[in-house]
Image (spheres, helix red, strand yellow):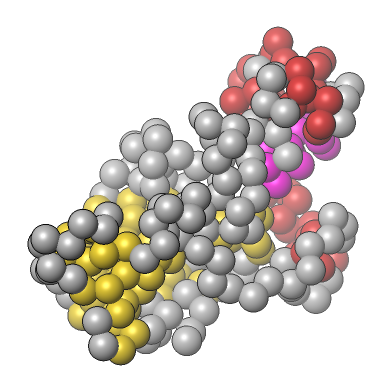
């Protein structure tokens, strides 16, 4: 299998992590989020068929421009891989792709707080229309295995490095690089400063970290009424104040 991101990236949210950004506070993340610069190349990790290639750049609640690949696993079994928040798609529905083929560029379309790739996977098997199990449909019906696992069949399919708080490169499985760290901070800091200026909020370094690393709900990060609240307390206290813990 080829890793689908061709360029520098960092894991910003793992499978199963809970974020305030979800409307349902009990809901946890159903995939992996990898921060990467806008326009970073996305490739097919394995030979597959494109079953979804949709452009919804202004979709405020979902995956924006996204692609789903159907990857054969032998017999009647397949994986359904979804890649969300893309800038541009280079494939169409029904197209067969080979491992390593360019299928899109990464961006921040849809419900997203920064440039990144959302990648999730479900295991399915070819079935019949009369099968009572939860199904999805493409050229033929596919039963979603383990649908009631709390993630509608999505599951943790990648081995991850141990999660550390700092330095951030250690969390994302990359050797620490001071120059890259400075570059990432400069890009994210500039965006956070613009947002702070737009909403009349004094800028401090926590704004950048809150927005990019998902420690706080992005809607509240740039809300002047909440600024004095979240800057004076730790995450658990903040979540309690919002009634989400």
State the image coordinates of residue 97 (x, y, percent, origin top left). Answer: 26, 81
Q: Is residue 224 above or below residue 61?
A: above
Residue at horizontal 21%, vertical 57%? 132
Residue at horizontal 59%, vertical 36%? 26
User: Which quarter of the figure is the C terminus placed in?
Assistant: top right
Magenta part of the protein: which range?
202-214
Q: Is residue 207 magenta?
A: yes
Q: Quadrant of residue 126?
A: bottom left
- Give the left or right position of residue 198, taking residue 24 as reference: right
Q: Quadrant of residue 49?
A: bottom left
Residue at horizontal 34%, vertical 55%? 66
Secondary structure, magenta segment, majority class: helix
State the image coordinates of residue 163 (x, y, percent, origin top left). Answer: 79, 62
Q: Is residue 57 above or below residue 89?
A: above
In this orientation, which residue lies closer to the viewer: 88 or 245? 245
Residue farthest along the top direction in this orientation: 225
In this orientation, which residue lies closer to the viewer: 197 or 216? 216
- Give the left or right position of residue 45, taking residue 17 as reference: left
Examine the rendering and report whether any part of residue 197 can be seen.
no
In this orientation, which residue lies closer to the viewer: 159 or 216? 159
In this orientation, which residue lies closer to the viewer: 80 or 111? 80
Q: Quadrant of residue 15?
A: bottom right
Q: Is residue 70 above or below residue 76?
A: above
- Give the left or right position of residue 105, taking residue 191 as reference: left
Q: Is residue 185 above or below residue 172?
A: above
Residue at horizontal 31%, vertical 77%? 78
Q: Is residue 63 magenta?
A: no
Examine the rendering and report whether any part of residue 30 can be seen.
yes
State the image coordinates of residue 23 (x, y, percent, origin top left). Answer: 52, 29
């Amino acid at each position: 299998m080829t890793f689908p991101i061709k360029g520098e990236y960092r894991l910003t949210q793992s499978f199963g992590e809970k974020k305030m950004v979800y409307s349902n506070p009990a809901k946890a993340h159903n995939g992996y989020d990898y921060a990467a610069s806008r326009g970073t190349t996305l490739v097919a990790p394995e030979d597959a068929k494109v079953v979804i290639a949709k452009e919804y750049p202004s979709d405020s609640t979902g995956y924006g421009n996204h692609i789903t690949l159907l990857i054969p696993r032998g017999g009647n079994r397949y994986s359904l891989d979804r890649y969300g928040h893309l800038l541009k798609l280079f494939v169409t529905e029904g197209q067969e792709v080979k491992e390593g083929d360019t299928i899109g560029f990464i961006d921040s379309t849809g419900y997203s707080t920064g440039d990144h790739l959302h990648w999730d996977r479900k295991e399915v098997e070819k079935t019949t229309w009369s099968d009572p199990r939860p199904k999805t449909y493409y050229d033929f019906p596919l039963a979603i295995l383990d649908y009631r696992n709390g993630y509608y069949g999505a599951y943790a399919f990648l081995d991850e490095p141990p999660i550390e708080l700092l330095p951030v490169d250690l969390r994302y499985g990359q050797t620490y690089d001071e120059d890259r760290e400075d570059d990432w901070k400069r890009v994210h800091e500039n965006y956070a400063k613009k947002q702070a200026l737009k909403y009349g909020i004094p800028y401090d370094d926590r704004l950048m970290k809150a927005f990019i690393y998902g420690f706080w709900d992005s809607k509240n990060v740039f809300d002047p009424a909440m600024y004095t609240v979240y800057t004076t307390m730790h995450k658990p206290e903040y979540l309690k104040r919002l009634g989400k813990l």
